[in-house]
Image (spheres, rainbow, N blue to C red):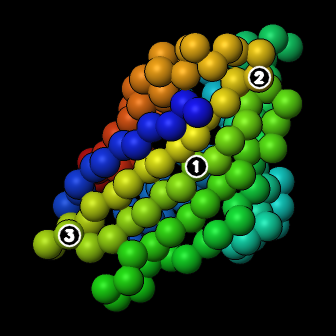
């Protein structure tokens, strides 16, 4: 399994960090050559499906995902979201946790990333690449956007 984990701290309140991390369309802002489209109507909840399309023109692949757990943070209880990857090329799952940490928030991103056809001997490399790519996406999502 190509398991990896990313931990971050942010001065943002947990509710704002959650809002930014679950703004699915913006995930493409931090991942090169990727566009994310939500396929189900609002509000976001269990059963919401979205697709990350990575590629250039007709060359690329879709990474469809479905939310199977949706618990936004409330008060002292951390928020948790679990995504199941449903694609032909990319499978696995991702979990996001956001909770209070002092005057800001902590977040944990856990993922089991599988690329079909890639030998298990490359799991460590896949996990390392996942940490880099998704770590960059998290940085973009959490960045202060005030002028």
What's the residue at 64%, 69% (across, down)? 69
Label 2: which secondary element: loop
Cα distance, mark 2 to mark 3?
A: 37 Å
What's the residue at 38%, 65% (across, down)? 98
What's the residue at 56%, 64% (across, down)? 81
Residue situated furthest left in the rendering: 102
What's the residue at 81%, 11% (across, down)? 59
Residue 80 tag number:
none
Cα distance, mark 1 to mark 3?
A: 22 Å
Q: Quadrant of residue 102?
A: bottom left
Give the vertical position of 62 relative to 44 (above or below): above
Query: Which is nearer the eye, 103 or 76?
Result: 76
x%, y% of residue 77? Answer: 38, 83
Give the vertical position of 20 relative to 57 (above or below): below
Image quadrant holding the N terminus, namely top right
Going from N to C along the chain, the mark reached first, 1 or 3, is: 1
Cα distance, mark 2 to mark 1?
A: 17 Å
Residue 116 tag number:
2
Residue 94 tag number:
1
Q: Nearer the viewer, mark 1 or mark 3?
A: 1
Q: Nearer the viewer, mark 2 or mark 1?
A: 2
Label 1: which secondary element: strand
Q: Which residue is mark 3?
A: 101
């Amino acid at each position: 399994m190509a398991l990896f984990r990313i931990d971050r701290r942010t001065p943002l309140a947990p509710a704002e960090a959650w809002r930014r991390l679950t703004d699915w369309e913006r995930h493409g802002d931090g991942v090169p050559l990727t566009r994310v489209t939500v396929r189900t109507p609002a509000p976001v909840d269990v059963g919401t499906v979205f697709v990350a399309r990575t590629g250039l023109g007709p060359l690329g692949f879709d990474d469809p995902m479905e939310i199977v757990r949706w618990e936004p943070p409330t008060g002292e209880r951390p928020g948790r979201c679990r995504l199941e990857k449903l694609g032909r090329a990319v499978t696995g799952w991702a979990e996001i946790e956001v909770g209070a940490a002092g005057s800001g928030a902590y977040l944990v991103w856990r993922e089991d990333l599988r690329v079909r056809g890639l030998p298990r001997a490359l799991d460590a490399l896949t996990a390392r690449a996942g940490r880099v790519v998704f770590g960059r996406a998290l940085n973009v999502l959490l960045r202060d956007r005030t002028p």
